Amino acid sequence: METPVTATSHSNSTKRETRFRGMRLCKWCRTLNLNAVFNRKHLTDCGSPVRQRTRPGRDFRVDSCPLCNLIASEFGEPAGKLCEKRYQLYSYSSSRINRGGWAAIDTVMLSLKSKKRFKGKDFANEMRFLVPQMKTDEPIRVIPPLISMSLLQGWVTRCREGHSKRCGLPAEAMAPLAGISSLKMIDCRTGRLEGWSGQPYATLSYVWGKESAPLFTPVLDIPQLPPTIQDTIGLTLALGINYLWIDRYCINQQNHAEKAEQLPKMDLIYNLSDVTIINAAGEGTQAGLAGVGRPRSAIRQPQARIGNRLLISSTKHPTLDIQQSVWSSRGWTYQEGVLARRRIVFTPQQVYYECRGMYCCEALNWNLDALHTLDGQQFRAQYRLDKEKKDKLGLFSVGLGGGRGGSPWDVIRRIEEYSLRALREGDVLDGIRGVLGAMERGQWRLRHLWGVPLLPRAPRPTVAVGRRRSSEEREEDLEIYKSITWTPTIGLCAGLCWGSTMAMERRPGFPSWSWTGWKLPARTRVANLEAGSEISSGAQQWTVPVTWDLKESEWRWFQGTQSLMAYVEVRGARLSLDGAEFETHYQRLGAQLSAIPRRYALVAVEVSPGTYERVGIGKLDQCSLEDPSKPKPAALITFRMGPLSVVKVWKEFQLK
């Protein structure tokens, strides 16, 4: 039988400890053999039920039993609802959970698992745990109302000293900043705006909200600045950095020439900054940085002492708060987060840190050295937050523009992610110019036309992981790969293979053949995949969520042609084409292409002599539009409606 227990909650510890001091566990909780549970070893990450049968809701004694109250407080469910959803109390071995760095510690944890919600590995990054604090090592930090600056300094120092290859910069990397004549920094000691002269600096990423841009002034009165700006200046100085770049103050918002010079070079400004401070805890400059200038009020980290064990909440992982924040729904903030090398992200409950080599947060006190590779440059691959996303270590992408862990196809992934964000009418291209600029300045020199990437040739074929192929098959793949001709025109055709399943309307001022030329209709409500909630497009002009019909696996075998012209009939949103007529035209491409069963068709309408408007992408499979799902190599067939000389190339078209 367990000894008397006490329970506390960080937000109101005095009242709760007094309330439960000396109280015993309820009848149901006393039947649990917690000693056996916390000495249990699990062979998988699926966990084991602490007790096979779910207790009735009426047996939860949240008002008198500390363990019942701890469970209800941690998982945010009233007793009756816990019963309705058929929750069960499970135990897990942290060493078996490879995601999120839990394997760095060796302990047994408790969590509430729903039969309906959590199946297999779906819960790995979403569940909260009750973790026993050990005498020799405390895997969970108690989150204080005010942030420990020494903790943040330690994370940044660990990166500066240990991630020289992943996050460091060669001396000559800063040189391009000198070419930005209008670039200015805030001297955090005086508030004066000064031209950049090679000094390290920090950047700020936040949501402007409904506030208008201030009039430009060369000297800022720091005590009179909004809370978010004051807190950022104080944090920058605490990190040992004297200069700070903030768009609303360092760019003269009334000077169009200055904006035109700096907007296309956001990749340089954010990528070359020493650290980027991100405020995902509020909207506008009045919110402040939670835990810097004022105590945090949203901390929810319940704990209880059960016998000789202190069980404490791991809290919700901060990446979930970031994904559900207003900051993650705005278009301009997307590239600011992606381009940064080091990020300190403020959420309502705690701070999250991520660079190109590691991620960590306030609540989880892991041994970072144990998570790193032998050379100390980055976390081991098994500690990715999401193992299926190879281009991301934690929440943000890595390898943008080239280098280790990157691919030219990253530009497609970035555009697809960006298209989920909200933007003002004319900002759709400016909001991603930094990402596109990084790809152009990177090793692939990847250019774009109105946001449509001119994809380079795919890498040489390699043997897929877990798949054995004979030497003859590998030689055959290589011969096909060598036989494919790749030109910038074909790269543009591949970039034009975007599409959307949602209703959309034209965005004026942008070409119809680019994804930037379309938006969601007014009052359309969409499920924002990053924010996880429905947001109306009435206040902001939403870009159309786009995906590329051409898949990365097909990219290597992609072929394009402009030597084919067919007359097709467009009726509403449907593409009509006589199969026999298409086959006649298609055979002109030769026997080699006839072996490729999937065909993409770019349909364009001539709206005036020499001006063409994109209708959409059609998929033709064995002269049919009915079955485009077979995973076969793809050829793009460019359809033009109306008289057109086949010798012209896309550069000569005045595409609308």
Image: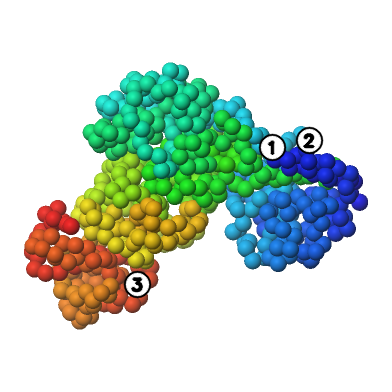
How crowded pointer 3 is (Cα within 10 Å; few <14, some 14-19, many 20+) is rated as: some
Label located before the other in sequence (3 or 2): 2
- Viewer-side residue, 370 vs 297: 297
Q: Say which of marks 1 and 2 sits in front.
A: 1
Disc 3 on helix, strand or loop? loop
Is residue 158 among what the camera can see?
no
Instruction: Tell me whether the residue at label 3 lies in contact with that at label 1, contact meaning CB atoms closer than 8 angstroms.
Output: no
Q: CA distance from mark 3 to mark 2?
A: 60 Å
Q: Position of residue 521 (x, y in %)?
A: 34, 62
Q: Residue at x 67, y 44 (%)?
A: 300
Instruction: Give the labeled residue for mark 3.
Output: 628
Q: Position of residue 426 (x, y in %)?
A: 28, 48
Q: Residue at x 56, y 30 (%)?
A: 293
- Viewer-side residue, 563 vs 538: 538
Task: Check disc 2 and give the amino acid type.
Answer: Lys
Q: Say which of marks 3 and 2 sits in front.
A: 2
How crowded pointer 1 is (Cα within 10 Å; few <14, some 14-19, many 20+) is rated as: some
Rendered image: mark on residue 185:
none
Picture quadrant of residue 621: bottom left
19 relative to 586 in the view: left or right: right
Disc 2 on helix, strand or loop? loop
Instruction: Give the labeled residue for mark 1.
Output: 142
Rendered image: mark on residue 135:
2
Is residue 207 among what the camera can see?
yes
62 relative to 491 in the view: left or right: right
Q: Residue at x 89, y 44 (%)?
A: 22
Task: Check disc 3 and give the amino acid type.
Answer: Pro
Q: Position of residue 423 (x, y in %)?
A: 36, 49
Pick out the residue farthest to the top.
Answer: 190
Q: Say which of marks 3 and 1 sits in front.
A: 1
Label located before the other in sequence (1 or 2): 2
